[in-house]
Image (cartoon, grey):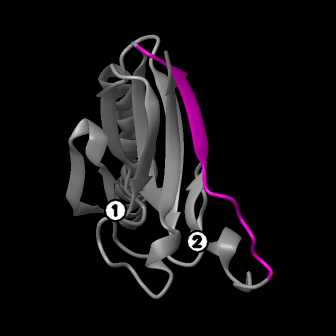
């Protein structure tokens, strides 16, 4: 009788462990699938990570990657992206520290509900006019908020 109970408990424990381990993997796979459906084919995709002290950083940057970098030692340039007129542009926005906003006012983009750490927010535009356009953080995010800028160049 004890043996049968022990076997049932082991089966239930194994099932619970499989669900708990498989759930994050399933969510990750689903998210990757959904993101790909939301990005049009042929779009120019740029990843940006907001950091209060370093500004917008190209790519996906984790918080622990920037911990310990001194302001004076970190002379990072602002991101610069070049696309052609008519391109569809998708920004994959993230944050490594606090809630940031995103503004590309020449294209009518104002994200005020926040780009949160650990989450990705997609912004899509049609580069329908040539020129030099500045994007920035539009939520006061700290002492170095003024560093939160970058440039999008649309070639004719």
Q: Nearer the viewer, mark 1 or mark 2?
A: 2
Secondary structure type for disc 2: helix
Secondary structure type for disc 1: helix
**x and y, in percent, of residue 32 in the image:** 42, 33
Q: Which residue is mark 2?
A: 63
Q: Depth check: 45 or 77 in front?
A: 77
> Which residue is at a point 27% across and 37% down the rendered structure image?
107
Q: Main secondary structure of the magenta part?
A: loop
**Mark 1 vs mark 2: which is more N-terminal?**
1
Give the extent of the magenta segment: 73-85
Whether pointer 1 and pointer 2 mark residues with C-beta atoms closer than 8 Å, the reply is no
Res 84 visible? yes
Res 14 visible? no
> Which residue is at a point 43% across and 16% down the rendered structure image?
87
Picture quarter containing residue 26?
A: top left
Residue 5 - label: 1
């Amino acid at each position: 009788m004890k043996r049968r109970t022990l076997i049932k408990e082991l089966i239930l424990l194994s099932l619970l462990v499989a669900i708990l381990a498989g759930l994050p993997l399933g969510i990750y796979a689903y998210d990757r699938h959904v993101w790909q459906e939301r990005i049009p084919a042929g779009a120019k995709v740029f990843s940006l990570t907001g950091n209060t002290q370093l500004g917008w950083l190209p790519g996906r940057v984790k918080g622990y990657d920037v911990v310990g970098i001194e302001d004076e030692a970190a002379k990072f340039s602002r991101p610069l992206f070049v696309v052609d007129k008519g391109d569809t542009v998708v920004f994959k926005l993230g944050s490594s520290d606090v809630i940031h906003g995103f503004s590309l006012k020449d294209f009518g983009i104002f994200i005020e509900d926040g780009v949160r750490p650990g989450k990705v927010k997609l912004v899509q535009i049609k580069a329908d006019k040539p020129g030099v356009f500045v994007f920035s953080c539009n939520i006061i995010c700290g002492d170095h908020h003024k560093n939160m800028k970058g440039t999008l160049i649309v070639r004719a």
